[in-house]
């Protein structure tokens, strides 16, 4: 997949554009005096010409795709759930996850949104787990994830 465009929206209303995943991660996690990112919009195109658009707003994941193929669906089916990743990475406890899942089932809110509202996670921790879920390997030390 070729990255067409990436826009990073920050809490202070600034928007930064980049043209590679590496550049995106550097802008979000390594810049000094960085404002808090609120969402990322990524557009890409595959070898068949299908265009994909994804928006991560740190509390929910949404995606648009022109074509779903079985290889993609199979890869998604094998992915770990966001909560599982957060527990494995010792960002939240199993008990916190169970509590939040109950709330999620009752109120139909996004898991990441509830975790942030309850103070169990920071937006950067949700982004870290989502990146890991999507197969983007980040090191916790590089992005200064703290509990």
Image (cartoon, rainbow, N blue to C red):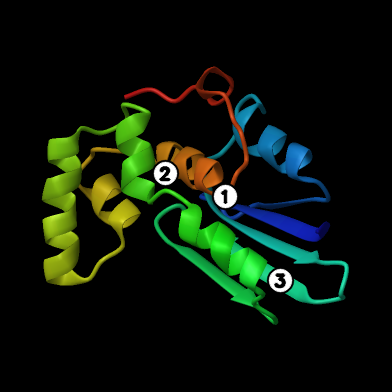
Counting other residues with Cα less than 10 Å from the Cα at mark 1, is it few (<14), some (14-19), or many (20 or more)?
A: few
How many neighbours does mark 2 have within 10 angstroms: few (below 14), some (14-19), or many (20 or more)? many
Q: Quadrant of residue 55?
A: bottom right
Kindly report the distance in space between the C-alpha atoms of the residues bearing marks 3 and 2. 22 Å
| Residue appearing at x 35%, y 37% in the figure | 86
Looking at this rendering, what residue extends furthest in the top direction? 141
Residue bearing mark 2: 126
Give the structural element (helix, strand or loop) at label 3: strand
Quadrant location, the C terminus: top left
Residue 58 location, x and y as percent? Answer: 45, 52
Between 102 and 10, which is closer to the camera in this rendering? Answer: 102
Circle 2 SS class: helix
Q: Which mark is residue 134?
A: 1
Closest to the observer, 146 or 77:
77
Is residue 55 in view from this perspective? yes
The residue located at (17%, 51%) in the rendering is 100
């Amino acid at each position: 997949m070729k990255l067409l465009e990436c826009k990073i929206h920050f809490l202070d209303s600034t928007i930064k554009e980049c043209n590679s995943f590496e550049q995106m991660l550097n802008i979000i996690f390594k810049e000094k005096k960085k404002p808090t990112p609120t969402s990322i919009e990524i557009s890409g195109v595959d070898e068949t010409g299908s265009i994909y658009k994804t928006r991560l707003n740190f509390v929910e994941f949404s995606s648009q795709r022109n074509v779903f193929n079985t290889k993609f669906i199979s890869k998604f089916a094998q992915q770990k759930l966001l909560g599982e990743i957060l527990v494995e990475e010792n960002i939240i406890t199993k008990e916190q996850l169970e509590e939040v899942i109950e709330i999620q089932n009752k109120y139909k809110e996004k898991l990441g949104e509830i975790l942030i509202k309850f103070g169990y996670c920071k937006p950067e921790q949700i982004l870290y787990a989502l990146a890991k879920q999507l197969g983007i390997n980040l090191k916790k030390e590089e992005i200064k994830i703290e509990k």
